[in-house]
Image (cartoon, rainbow, N blue to C red):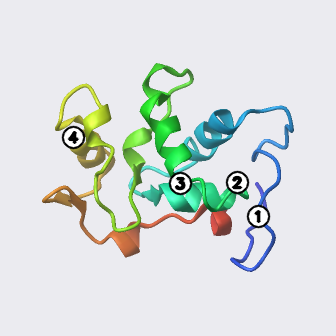
Amino acid sequence: MATKRTKTEKPRSVAPSGRKDENFFEQVFEVVRQIPKGRVTSYGAIAACLGTKGSSRMVGWAMNGSHRVRPKVPAQRVVNRNGMLTGKFHFETITKMEELLKKDGVQVKNDKVVDFRKLFWDPLLEL
C-alpha cells in the first residue's frame, strides 16, 4: 500500500501504478478505480492528484468515455467540487448515476451528495 501524502507535497508526475507511458485518461481511470465504495471525489481532486490541477474538465471528458472501459470504472463516484451529480447526463439514463451511488451507500438529495465533505475522498491524501 502506498504511503499517504499531505496536500503540500508535490503532485504525482506519473500514474499511481508508476508507469510513465499511460495516457491521461488511463491515469484518471486508475485513480477512479481506487475510490472506495461509499466515498466520492471531485474532478478537480483527481486532476490535482495527477499533477494537472487545471485539467478538471479533461477528467470530466475521461469520465464521459469511461463506460466503455474495462476493467470497470466507477464513474458515479466522481462529482463536482460541490458534490453535485453534474455527470449524470452521461449515464444510460438520467437517474443511473444516483442509483449507482445509492447502491454504493451514498445518499443523494436533489442531485447532490448528502454529507459530501464527510464522504469526500482526496486522492492526494489517500494514494
User: In this figure, which residue is indicated by the disc labeled 4?
Assistant: 99
User: In this figure, which residue is indicated by the disc labeled 1?
Assistant: 11
User: In this figure, which residue is indicated by the disc labeled 3?
Assistant: 56
Identify the secondary structure beneath mark 4.
helix
**Identity, as a three-letter code, of the amino acid under mark 4:** Glu
**Identity, as a three-letter code, of the amino acid under mark 1:** Pro
User: Residue visible at 73% across and 33% down?
Assistant: 23
Report how far apart the C-alphas of labels 2 and 4 lie in the structure: 28 Å
Residue 21 % position (x, y): 84, 32
Marks 3 and 1 in Cβ contact (< 8 Å): no
Position of residue 78 in the picture relative to residue 70 (left or right): left
User: Residue visible at 50% across and 52% down?
Assistant: 36
Position of residue 50 in the picture relative to residue 115 (left or right): right
**Identity, as a three-letter code, of the amino acid under mark 2:** Leu
Report how far apart the C-alphas of labels 3 and 4 lie in the structure: 24 Å
User: In this figure, which residue is indicated by the disc labeled 2?
Assistant: 50
